[in-house]
Image: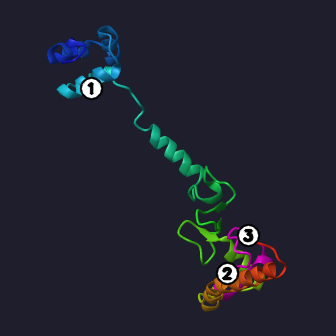
Amino acid sequence: MLKYGQLSDPEWLAKEIENKPLRQVADEVGCSYSAVVYQVRKFGLTVPKRFTRRQSPDKSENIKKALRERYPEGRFGKNASNWRGGRRKMKSGYVMVYMPEHPRAKNSGAVFEHIVVAEKKIGRPIYMNEVVHHINHVKDDNRPENLEVMERGAHLSNHFNEPIKLQKENARLKALLKANGIDYT
């Protein structure tokens, strides 16, 4: 049972909304506007057009038309309302730049910045069997001196041999500490 008994009577509600806006009915009953709307929908009643909001049917079309005139090529790249310079850092840690004309650009028009910088450094496009290696392993450090172009196989070997190199260096340092009588634990 409703707190406001009058709203549970479909005949009374139909008579009221025929002559008054829903907000006025809600005020008179002492309930919220949404409670009246709920009951109207529940009973399948229709609100007279004079009490519904009137919005220009072609208002959105006018806006779309104005935008098409102002941006005939669309609102992509520098014309986009949320343009931030075309450079963004991805969750993976790599940086992407907006360059839709680049052959390696994704569907969004973005390409990895380290690829662009490495291509400028070596003066040619990077081949498909090549990758760009970050020497210091910092994914967003795209300075030319930190980037090295290498074949995929050599790059994999480099990364798989790194733990072995680190283990050897760690063992050497432990031996050095032990030889000098320093407890490292």
> Is 164 colored magenta in this rendering?
no
Q: Which amino acid does label 2 sit on?
A: Val
Mark 1: which secondary structure? helix
102 and 28: which is toward the camera: 28
Q: In which quarter of the image is residue 8?
A: top left
Q: Residue 95, image x and y in percent?
A: 66, 66
The residue singled out by tag 1 in the image is 38
Disc 2 and disc 1 in contact, CB within 8 angstroms: no
Q: Hey, what amino acid is under mark 1?
A: Tyr
Q: Which mark is residue 141?
A: 3
Q: Residue 96: give x, y in percent of width and height.
A: 64, 67
Amino acid type, callout 3:
Asp
Mark number displayed over residue 132: 2
Measure the alpha-carbon separation of dots 3 and 2.
12 Å
Tell me the residue at 57%/59% (across/down): 73
Q: In this view, does 67 lie to the left or right of 144?
A: left
